[in-house]
């Protein structure tokens, strides 16, 4: 059975100033998502599932339904306000986070699947790595995460926040340690740069999480239980979000699964702000020049 690619695309892009998920960066105005779809098809995925908001439906279908002759395309919706029996939840302006986004796809995914963000570029090699794992190794007790080298995720334009991975002798995830304000200066990578907090040095070759996960569909049951409890505790908190690392950490600590960290040499980049776009365009053009991607993806 071919694996599925779940693309989280329900964000509003408020910091970007528009619907960044479909903003063109390629030479023919291809958005980052199209490069992910291209890599997914080449590495053996059989289905794409988009998590979007209902108000994005027409924009997404008009852009991505054209790939239905190449790979199966599905759409699911992440609601902002979710009803829970016996619980009164105050109105929210944002959904309940990335774990909630994964959960809304439970009725259309019955096979091992990868999870990515729509506005992040992950690299062709990483798609091959995760596809191989999902086909050959994934199980209810063994899932995975693609681990990027910290130095390959830094920005030339300012500091970044990263989840630094601690792994055991079998390369299974032990913990993700959140580090903020990371930058490289004079050849040394530090965190808490430019803030009034104790700074520290990081290994530039450390493995970091960029939220590229490989899951077995059994995880939906655990997310549903965890999210329900999280909503009950945070019913009056309009900004509380239940993130994918939350459920992963809970399952690891509860010894319900192991998460293999699969190292990749690919560079990662994301588009959060408008100022990030020129870098993204330049990087894609570089990959085209190097022959990694054709100038026109679909001819």
Image (tube, helix red, strand yellow):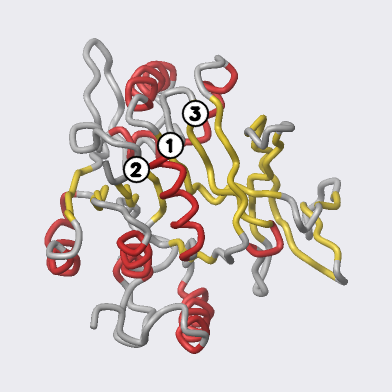
Rounded to the nearest angstrom, the CA distance separating label 2 from label 1 is 7 Å
- x 66%, y 42%: residue: 178
Q: Which mark is residue 142?
A: 3
Q: Which mark is residue 239?
A: 1
Q: Are marks 2 and 1 in contact (CB under 8 Å)?
A: yes
Can you say whether 186 is above or below 9 in the image?
Answer: below
Can you say whether 77 is above or below 240 in the image?
Answer: below
Rounded to the nearest angstrom, the CA distance separating label 3 from label 1 is 31 Å
> Which type of secondary structure does the marked residue at label 1 adopt?
loop
Towards the viewer: 37 or 133: 133
Q: Earlier in the sequence, mark 3 or mark 1?
A: 3
> Which type of secondary structure does the marked residue at label 3 adopt?
strand
| x then y, percent, for residue 72 | 17, 54
Q: Of tags 3 and 1, which is closer to the observer?
A: 3
Q: Earlier in the sequence, mark 2 or mark 3?
A: 2
Residue holding disc 2 = 94
Residue 240 appears in the rendering:
no
Q: Based on the displayed image, in which of its 4 quarters is residue 102 positioned?
A: top left
Can you say whether 110 is above or below 48 in the image?
Answer: above
- x 47%, y 84%: residue: 291
Label 3 crowd bin: few (<14), some (14–19), many (20+), radius 10 Å = some
Towards the viewer: 13 or 210: 210
| x then y, percent, for residue 154 | 66, 64
Q: Is residue 129 left or right of residue 261?
A: left
């Amino acid at each position: 059975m071919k694996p599925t690619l779940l693309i989280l695309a329900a964000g509003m892009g408020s910091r970007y100033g528009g619907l960044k998920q479909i903003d063109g960066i390629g030479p023919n105005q291809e958005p980052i998502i199209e490069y992910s779809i291209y890599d997914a098809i080449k590495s053996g995925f059989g289905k794409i599932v988009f998590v979007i908001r209902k108000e994005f439906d027409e924009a997404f279908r008009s852009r991505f339904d054209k790939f239905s002759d190449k790979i199966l395309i599905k759409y699911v919706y992440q609601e902002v306000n979710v009803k829970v029996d016996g619980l009164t939840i105050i109105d929210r302006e944002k959904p309940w986070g990335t774990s909630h986004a994964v959960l809304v796809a439970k009725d259309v995914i019955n096979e091992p699947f990868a999870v990515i963000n729509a506005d992040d570029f992950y690299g062709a090699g990483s798609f091959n790595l995760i596809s191989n794992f999902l086909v050959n190794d994934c199980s209810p007790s063994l899932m995975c995460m693609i681990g990027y080298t910290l130095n390959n995720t830094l920005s030339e334009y300012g500091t970044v926040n990263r989840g630094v991975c601690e792994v055991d002798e079998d390369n299974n995830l032990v913990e993700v340690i959140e580090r903020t304000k990371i930058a490289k200066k004079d050849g040394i990578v530090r965190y808490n740069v430019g803030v009034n907090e104790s700074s520290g040095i990081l290994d530039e070759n450390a493995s970091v999480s960029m939220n590229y996960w490989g899951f077995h569909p059994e995880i939906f049951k655990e997310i549903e239980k965890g999210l329900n409890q999280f909503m009950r505790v945070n019913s009056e908190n309009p900004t509380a979000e239940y993130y994918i690392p939350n459920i992963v950490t809970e399952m690891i600590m509860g010894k319900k699964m192991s998460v293999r960290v699969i190292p990749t040499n690919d560079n990662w980049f994301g588009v959060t702000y408008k100022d990030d776009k020129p870098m993204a365009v330049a990087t894609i053009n570089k990959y085209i020049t190097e022959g990694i991607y054709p100038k026109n993806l679909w001819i």
